[in-house]
Image: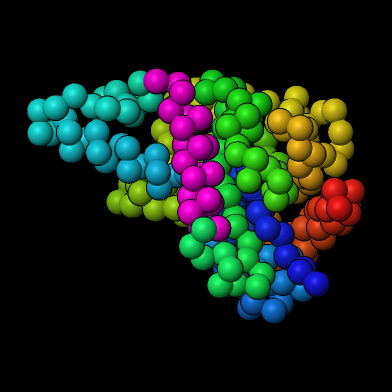
Amino acid sequence: MKNTFDILMLIARPAAGKSEVIDFLKRTPFQNRVERFHVGDFNEIDDFPMLWAWFEEDELLEKAGYPRLHTDENNYFKYPYLWNILIERICLEFHKYVREEQEKSKQPTTIIEFSRGIEHGGYKAAFQHLSEEVLSKAAILYIDVPWEESLRKNRRRFNPDRPDSILEHGLEDEKLERLYKHIDWEEVSASDPQFIDIKGYSVPYVIMNNHDDVTTQGGELLEHRLEEALGRLWDIYQQRHNNVT
């Protein structure tokens, strides 16, 4: 019997610990990862590399004397709908993975990672651009940190020599505040403690409290916190599957 999530969506404020969770899971031996965290062979889809590629393309265009396509000179999107295009790009990448690779693994798990703030539509808008292919297989792990913790960790992790790094990228304080201080997670998840209704799909979710920053501490603290959260999520995930079948 399959013992792994098909799709695990990791969502949270920037610097909340998503990348650290992924790094921990990657370093966990396969059998241990399946048995304790219900995560199989890794397929990771993160919208940050897609977004960063747009930044780099616009800089190249500007240097060559052409108009920037996606962002202004301060790297804010010219068009708000581009945030939703990133979600659709994530779904497209998953579709291509299913087409080409998924059957090669008996226990694949796609990890989808992104953050959204109210300024660019929030999770309410982002979720509406998830494909049915994704929604039918997804479970959500929301990593909860307050705004102040997101700001602190964003400052701490930022390496100006590696702004394109998954683990070391960051935002200026002003930009982080504008884009991510206000979020709509509580509103989106308020109607049910276990499921979020998205386009007619009941998507299971759990919240992992990271106010004490176990993702940076790592070790047994993170291991036990994550195992407990994903264990609860797996139970809800199976409940949805049983109800569907």
- Majority secondary structure of the magenta segment? helix
The answer to which image quadrant residue 6 occupies is bottom right
Q: Is residue 192 left or right of residue 48?
A: right
- Can residue 153 be seen? no
Q: Is residue 34 above or below residue 63?
A: below
Q: Is residue 90 left or right of residue 196?
A: left
Task: Residue at 38% x, 25% y: name it.
Answer: 77
Q: Which residues are magenta?
A: 79-98
**Residue 62 x/y as whole percent:** 16, 30
Residue nearest the observer in this picture, 244 or 55:
244
- Can residue 83 be seen? yes
Task: Residue at 52% x, 37% y: name it.
Answer: 87
Q: Is residue 16 left or right of residue 187?
A: left
Residue placed furthest toward the left: 65
**Residue 196 x/y as whole percent:** 78, 35
Please give the count of numbered marks on the rendered protein: 0
Q: Is residue 89 above or below residue 127?
A: below
Indicate the quadrant containing the N terminus: top left, top right, bottom left or bottom right: bottom right
Task: Residue at 63% x, 29% y: name it.
Answer: 128
**Residue 143 x/y as whole percent:** 69, 45
The answer to which image quadrant residue 192 occupies is top right
**Residue 114 x/y as whole percent:** 55, 42
Task: Residue at 26% x, 41% y: name it.
Answer: 56
Residue nearest the observer in this picture, 34 or 210:
34
Q: How is the image coloured?
A: rainbow
Q: Is residue 62 left or right of residue 131?
A: left
User: Was residue 12 drawn as part of the magenta stretch in this picture?
Assistant: no
